[in-house]
Amino acid sequence: MGLGSYAARRVVTGMITLIVVMIFNWFLFRLPSIVTGSDPSWYYVYSRVAAGSFTAERMVFMLLSFKQRWRIPSLHAPIGVWLDHLIMYMINMFTFNLGEDLFLYSGRPIVEILAARIPVSVYLILPETLIAIGIGIAIGARLGARPGGKFDVIMMAVALMLYSIPTFWLQLIFKLLFTVNWTIWPAAGGLFYYGKSTSDILINALDMFFMLILPIMTLVIAGFAGWMLLMRNSLMEVMGEDYILTAKAKGLDEATILYKHAFRNAILPVVTGVILALAFVWTGAVITETIFVIPGIGYLLFQAIIQLDYPLVEATFYFIALATIFANIIADISYALLDPRVRY
């Protein structure tokens, strides 16, 4: 099987996976209705009633509005009606016709909401991912070249300690230190936290960068250790191969053996992880964005779950699944391109 056939097969399997995920996503938000026999619209109405007092007419209006805007069939509708609903749902997902939001941004198209939040998540996750990968690979390559030394022992202890620390705990400690004990960074947002705002694009960009330095710092500290361990172990395995021993027997210098022969092959297993990590650039970090109140995709998902905004949660789940599946396809094809030994 050639590379073209392999790539086509991966695309087809990715599409099948996406369809399965879409069907699961559809059942996930309608399963309570099937189990309890209650219309999902009522869950939405109950959540709104619990937050305030509503008349019977207002409750009926909310119920009908929800059913109409989310296009939910009756629980007693024939199976054909539900199948039509499922097919229309899948068509809408494929065409990114995600409908309108119901509560947080009432009446606003969900696609616009996601499009407005994606750049914020990218601005947060992309620098952190690239910095953590760069530091991890650089240190891991040095450790893999000389395992067992003092630097290797020290860095392994540091890496294992950082790897075992929950990221959210580290972020809470940093936020306590730098926003409460030492007011170096704002607790939430940038200039808006101090009641100020500006329409200048450059100032807003710099303000956002300043706001994101602290969460980026915590993510880099918590994330580089995994890349370091992965690169170290991969390079150690490659350094024991026969062609490395042959290169040493030929009298090649250590730098040539390490960077021209060993490193190029040791980096291949890391490529898949790098591409998958870049997929999460678009989907945000729920815990990080929630702790630091960063208006990205992750914080949007948290708000939607708390407010029981079902259509928004459903659309966000689909977007995250789509990005992950697409990244897996790109990772598999890239690995096949980089390593000619891969059998299709």
Image: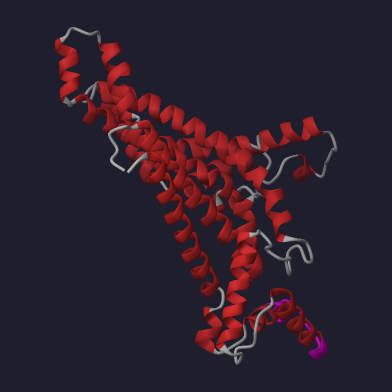
| Location of the C terminus (image quadrant) | top left
Residue 36 is situated, as x and y percent measured from the top left of the image, at 53, 88
Residue 126 is situated, as x and y percent measured from the top left of the image, at 56, 37
| Residue 222, picture quadrant | top left
Q: Judge whether 201 appears above or below 315 on screen.
A: above
Residue 51 is situated, as x and y percent measured from the top left of the image, at 72, 76
Q: Is residue 53 magenta?
A: yes
Give the residue furthest to the right.
Answer: 199
Residue 226 is situated, as x and y percent measured from the top left of the image, at 37, 38
Q: Is residue 143 magenta?
A: no
**Closer to us: 317 or 132:** 317
| Location of the N terminus (image quadrant) | top left
Q: Which residues are magenta?
A: 47-57
Q: Is residue 199 left or right of residue 285?
A: right
| Residue 190, picture quadrant | top right
Q: Judge whether 270 appears above or below 264 on screen.
A: below
Task: Identify the residue at horizontal 55%, vertical 72% (top origin).
Answer: 26
Colour treatment of the image: secondary structure
- Is residue 225 among the parts visible in the rendering? no
Q: How many marks?
A: 0
Task: Identify the residue at horizontal 68%, vertical 46% (top origin).
Answer: 188
Q: Judge whether 33 appears above or below 249 on screen.
A: below
Task: Identify the residue at horizontal 73%, vertical 69% (top origin).
Answer: 102
| Residue 306, picture quadrant | bottom right
